[in-house]
Image (cartoon, rainbow, N blue to C red):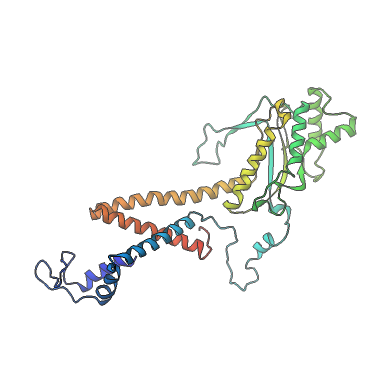
Amino acid sequence: TITPPAVIIYEKHFAKCTLGCVTSKQPVCPQGEAIAKKQPLIDDFYIPLMTKHNGAFAIAVIAALFGYGVFNTIEAMQLEPPTEQEQWFTEDHMFTGFFDTMQNDYLAGDDTAYTEVTITFGIDGIDRSGFNQYIPNSNRGSAEFDDGYSLATPECQQAFIKACDEAETFSCDHTGCDPYGTLGIPGKTRCFMKEFREYLNTTEGLDSYAITPEDFYSKLELFRSTDAPDDDQYASWESDIGFIDGDLKFASFTYLGTLELDQSVGVTEPVLYRHNDYIDAIKAYPECDVCDCGSAMHTTVLAWTWYHTERGLVDGFYQGLSIAMPVAFVVLLASTQNIVIAFYAITSVFFIVFGVLGFVKSSLGWALG
């Protein structure tokens, strides 16, 4: 990186002619004017060193720098947004690292520190017609329901309860699931179907598997309006049991995931994919050969949305570089009118940029941003 500015400074302040000079034992300008005295560092050290042994040393330097550049490029591609609190105070201030310590230095934190995951049956997707991505708070779309899903059938009820149980046992060996090693925290699943069956058996001595669909839905709607979850008597089942205009359109259950909030892309991504595996496992239940489980999906309040936001920020950053580099090459080519010089220059710029990014990642441990 020092070569271009060194040449410019030399030509501007020390040489008595421009790059039109030719080199010989007694270099002269085309007009015959003598060049300034030679530079000892360049003429007596740099050039002999680089040309020694037919340029072997120069080739070795190029190979070493290229290897280091490739290493930094690989490191730079692994940059992620920060996961720690911004340090607003000095190192010895009592608040420095306080929030990180409260979140990370205990075996388990408060429930609000973890991701709440919702599994929903009965919603096929969202109709986004009329949605404008540049006005995201308007016309966000409307749900498209799965008309084939019927919770009243015994198979659908069994599949639903089985999914509730498996949320706390489905294995996850990624860092984001430590220290539990499962998708859900044991004892933190809220499953209305289990409580409804208990409610029905206690109040009326009935088995939800053995009643007609009409009775099932009428009693489920009554349960929805009169009963509350066992773990929170101030909550309701309205968002879990989706009656719309008297018809059950969807059914959901929630569990507290082992993934903590505000994790990096690298931590969140494998846990997200493991949830996808969990949904695939639900759809493969034997009960789902009879029950239509094809609409099963998982959602979170913030974690998946924030993951895609961070992924978009990272992708946008590198997309910007991928646009800037070709544009810079075109500018260099137009200004130099020499494809070789333009190629060498853009290669230098590339390794300078990614050298800095890779260095701050590998040596300083900084995050992107």
Vertical relation: 285 (above or below) 274: above
In the rendered image, is residue 364 in sight?
yes
Residue 157 quadrant: top right
Residue in the foreground of this view, choosing between 136 and 81: 81
Residue 64 in the figure: left or right of residue 120 = left
Q: Quadrant of the N terminus?
A: bottom left
* Residue 226 in sight here: no
Residue 210 percent coordinates (x, y): 84, 25
Residue drawn at (59%, 72%) of the image: 91
Residue 118 rendering spot, x and y as whole percentages: 69, 41
Residue 262 lies, with reference to residue 363, above or below; the image says: above
Position of residue 246 measured from the top left corner of the image (x, y, whole percent): 73, 26
| Vertical comparison of 184 with 124: above or below | below
Q: Nearer the viewer, residue 93 or 2?
A: 2
Q: Tell me how many marks there are.
A: 0
Report the residue at 31% width, 52% height from top. Answer: 329
User: In the rendering, at what x and y percent does residue 84 appear?
Assistant: 60, 60
Residue at position x 47%, y 55% in the image: 74
